[in-house]
Image (cartoon, helix red, strand yellow):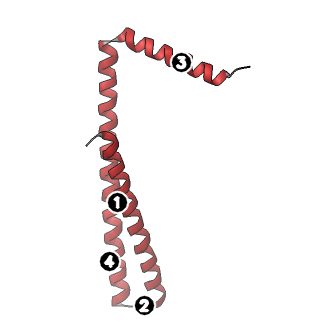
Amino acid sequence: MGAIESLKAQEHKLAKQLREVLAGAEEFMHSAGYETGDKLAEARRKFESITQRARQEFDDTEALLLAKGKAAAATTDAYVRAHPWTAAGICAGAGLLIGLLVSGRR
């Protein structure tokens, strides 16, 4: 699986977790208003479980993104060190293109 597909999969997992957290919060708020005792305690335990899973998922995604970012930076650094003139030419070309786009045709 490529990097983009992996990030898309993580995005979908995070969105699903967020929906679960919101549903759990709504259920907890509903139970807090109408229930007492054991039912309220059960709703609270369920909500805490959902939020812990979501927090773990967010932490895992953060670690994945940091690792992929570091790997990309290391790869870029190695390429620039191996081909400094090519990298300088690419940067100059990109700078020229951006300059032309920003200045517009006047």
CA distance separating discs 1 and 2: 27 Å
The image's mark for residue 69 is: none
Q: Marks 1/3: CA distance?
A: 41 Å
**Label 4 vs 3, first from the N-terminus:** 4
Q: Position of residue 68 (x, y in %)?
A: 31, 38
Q: Secondary structure at mark 4?
A: helix
How far apart, in angstroms, are the residues tagged by discs 2 and 4? 14 Å
Where's residue 6, x and y in %?
30, 46
Residue linked to disc 2: 35
In the rendered view of the protein, which quadrant contains the N terminus?
top left
Q: Are marks 2 and 4 in contact (CB under 8 Å)?
A: no
Q: Residue at x 30, y 26 (%)?
A: 74
Query: How far apart are the two marked residues, 2 and 3, measured between alpha carbons?
Result: 63 Å
Identity of the residue drawn at 33% across and 52% down: 10
Q: CA distance from mark 4 to mark 1?
A: 15 Å
Question: Which residue in the structure is indicated by mark 1?
Answer: 55
Name which residue type carries label 4: Arg
Going by the numbered disc 3, the residue's amino acid type is Gly
Name the residue carrying label 3: 95
Rendering coords of residue 105 (x, y %): 70, 20
> Is mark 4 in CB contact (under 8 Å) with mark 1?
no
Along the polypeptide, which appears first: circle 2 or circle 3? 2
Identify the image quadrant of residue 103.
top right
Reading the chain from its start, which is encountered first: label 1 or label 3?
Answer: 1
Q: Secondary structure at mark 3?
A: helix
